[in-house]
Amino acid sequence: MVNTGDTAWILVSAALVMLMTPGLALFYGGMVRAKSVLNMMMMSFGALALITVLWVLYGYSVAFGNDVGAGLLGDPGEFFGLAGLMEDTTSEAGGLPSMAFVGFQAVFAIITVALISGAIADRAKFGSWMVFAGLWATVVYFPVAHWVFDFDTDAGHVGGWIANDLAAIDFAGGTAVHINAGAAGLALALVLGRRRGFGREAMRPHNLPLVMLGAGLLWFGWFGFNAGSALAANNTAAVAWVNTLAATAAAILGWLLTEKVRDGHATSLGAASGAVAGLVAITPACSAVSPIGAIVLGVIAGALCALAVGLKYRLGYDDSLDVVGVHLVGGLWGTIAIGFLADPDAPAGVESLFFGGSVDQLWRQAVGAVAVLVFSFVLTLVIGFAIQKTIGFRITEEDEVAGIDTVAHAESAYDFASLGSSGSTAPLAGQARAEARNTERTLA
């Protein structure tokens, strides 16, 4: 029998997570220069469109079809086109219509792909990005989702190796989403190379209010991401909700304190980035730690990621919007921290090094995290270089200087050319009157 309360909660959670992708578009869009904002946002919207279609066709089946061997891959043909699921009222969590679970997991796939785009801002061909997004989702994300999210069931369904054989805890996607996307972002940044002027020219965010609005929408949607992963409106969802709030707030403080000590200023960009770092880190752990543990985890995540974003300047890779520093580092910390901070009284019910003196969960977390990191990084390099050598991945230097928005989309986010030198809107008004007269003559 369908549990209508749980079903309603999962559908609402799915909608919240879907909102995160437009939120990410605003967050990333505000962080780039004005001549790149539309392209940056289009990369998120393009992923939303493409991955949705692939998920319906075969992505769900690869991720949640019956395992075809060694916990590595679901049967691509079992649910092709979601066949057989429209009237099925069983799913990965009993009482949910299968389609509710399909929709909830679809939006995870979408935002994972969209996250990668921040590492290659300003310099990737839009068409090549779309080709990459489809290939990467097919050969990297869908299989990894099977590893991490597909549990064995009493009905004889066989799922993924990380969820079952390894028994690592990843409640909502620290490995499958954040480590996966972070490793891919690092690989693509290496494939495409550095932006013109990287390390020499200031590449400041062009619209910080847009960044903070995007961060706020991400935080809002993340409650569906984490609490919704309980797949029921129950105590586990409530604990995950509170831990998500606490860790994120603590991470903002950790990031701002680190900025203040290091640079002398606590910035709005730091507050927004700290919030995302906390959200990333608590994602795998929100069912395994106590609220105090969530605060500790969040403070460390904020400080750690604030320091990690500077690695690109020391090591020379151009991760444009800090996908590596926030998502890879935050995802690694949040996943491995379960082995240190998991509380046996939390819903996950496992012991950790600091709560029980056990290292059993710690090694499991580390193995799962490293496996996803290596798999994603290597395959992304292969896909990225293949695209670069065939259709080309990076725009020309001339196009990069001119601005990718006008080159790739024939649009600009802000009509600066229509403003007078003093910022007056008079030229705009004159142009509007001239256009109106032309229209009148045409109609006459």
Image (cartoon, helix red, strand yellow):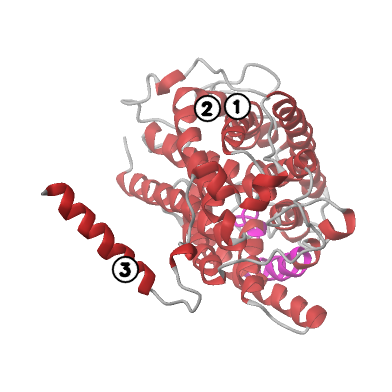
Name the residue nearer the viewer: 374 or 390.
390
Secondary structure under the numbered disc 3 in the rendered image: helix
Q: Disc 3 designates what residue?
A: 430
Few, some or many C-alpha atoms within 10 Å of disc 2 (few <14, some 14-19, many ≥20)?
Answer: many
| C-alpha gap between disc 2 and disc 1 | 7 Å
Q: Disc 2 designates what residue?
A: 59
Residue 213 image label: none
Name the residue nearer the viewer: 181 or 207.
207
Secondary structure under the numbered disc 1 in the rendered image: helix
Is residue 301 within the magenta segment?
yes
Q: Disc 1 designates what residue?
A: 138
Residue 94 in the figure: left or right of residue 316: left
The answer to which of marks 3 and 1 sits earlier in the sequence is: 1
Secondary structure under the numbered disc 2 in the rendered image: helix
Asked if the residue at tag 3 contacts the one at tag 2, i.e. Cβ–Cβ closer than 8 Å, the answer is no
Work out whether residue 154 can be spotted: no
| x 71%, y 68%: residue | 302
Q: Position of residue 82 (x, y in %)?
A: 41, 23
Q: Nearer the viewer, mark 2 or mark 1?
A: 1
Q: Position of residue 133 (x, y in %)?
A: 59, 34
